[in-house]
Amino acid sequence: MVLLHVKRGDESQFLLQAPGSAELEELTVQVARVYNGRLKVQRLCSEMEELAEHGIFLPPNMQGLTDEQIEELKLKDEWGEKCIPSGGSVFKKDDIGRRNGQAPSEKMKQVLKKTIEEAKAIISKKQVEASVCVTMEMVKDALDQLRGAVMIVYPMGLPPYDPIRMEFENKEDLSGTQAGLSVIKESEAQLWWAAKELRRTKKLSDYVGKNEKTKIIVKLQQRGQGAPAREPIISSEEQKQLMLYYHRRQEELKKLEENDDDTCLNSPWADNTALKRHFHGVKDIKWRPR
């Protein structure tokens, strides 16, 4: 199996294994699917952290309004009365005004936070350092864990306009958001390796050969963005070590230049004729008139 180290720009994303005979059409879609799936898990984790702190989403017509404005307009959060967390709620006002402030109890909050940490670990970029490949099954497992935790804490479900529920139902609207810019459509995804685009009409072996133990760094791009920057000859860590070495060497040379004391040349060990005189037996002979 060929090991693919997938990057987006200069950032490592995940490792993926594929046979050399894999069609690049299917492989490109698979890489884009795992990449987008990881983004989905990250978005869910972010929203679920807010859910644990401030409760469910307010209706769109009540978001950002003060209590006085809500009372004046006679608005009512009907879903807030239905979607009550297990074990009761604790009021914690959302300063942004997106959520109703009815946070779950401490016990239920820990259920959400523990599951969030586990899901983040599954799709973490640290998996690259640990040489663990990320598959679509692992991404689905992380999504299932998050879904299960929400069902435990909110057995009555979440409002239909809550972004967490919309993510689970694949109804999320990311248009006009920063998160939407990160998503790559499967039909527009491109893989690049060694400054060459891996064309979908070919096989992986057409580029990397038939050695199944090959490891390559591929970069994921969206069609129209052009070729990504080439990989540096040395890594950033190696560059730091190299600069540190030259800095130390420069400091040593400076100290040698400053230390111009030559009194040491009068010492016995600095006499280059000492060995010769030792063998001739003329050591420590002093010539002076009597």
Image (tube, rainbow, N blue to C red):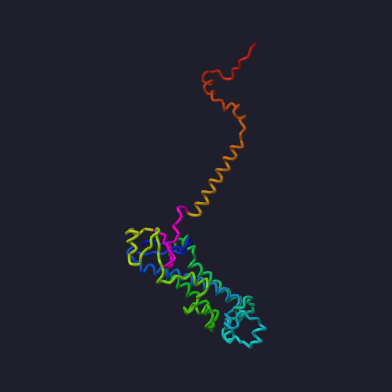
User: Is 139 left, or right, of 263 in this rendering?
Assistant: left
Is 150 located above or below residue 74 in the figure? Answer: above
Residue at image coords 59%, 37%: 257
Q: Is residue 227 magenta?
A: yes
Q: Is residue 23 magenta?
A: no
Residue at image coords 49%, 64%: 125
Q: For residue 209, which quarter of the picture?
A: bottom left
- Depth check: give the residue in front, 51 or 94: 94
Residue 237 visible in the displayed image: yes
Q: For residue 75, which quarter of the picture?
A: bottom right
Residue 104 visible in the displayed image: no
Is 138 located above or below residue 254 in the figure? Answer: below
Question: In the image as oriented, which residue stretches furthest toward the top?
Answer: 290
Question: In the image as oriented, which residue stretches furthest toward the right?
Answer: 68
- Give the total of numbered labels: 0
Q: Quadrant of the N terminus?
A: bottom left
Residue at image coords 58%, 74%: 50
The image position of residue 29, as x and y in percent, is 39, 70
The image position of residue 63, as x and y in percent, is 60, 80
Q: For residue 271, which quarter of the picture?
A: top right
Q: Quadrant of the C terminus?
A: top right
- Depth check: give the residue in front, 21 or 138: 21
Q: Main secondary structure of the magenta part?
A: loop
- Depth check: give the residue in front, 166 or 115: 166
Is 249 located above or below residue 275 in the figure? Answer: below
Is 288 located above or below residue 66 in the figure? Answer: above
The image position of residue 86, as x and y in percent, is 57, 81
Q: Which residues, given as a range, are shown in magenta?
A: 215-234
- Depth check: give the residue in front, 255 or 279: 255
The image position of residue 269, as x and y in percent, is 57, 28
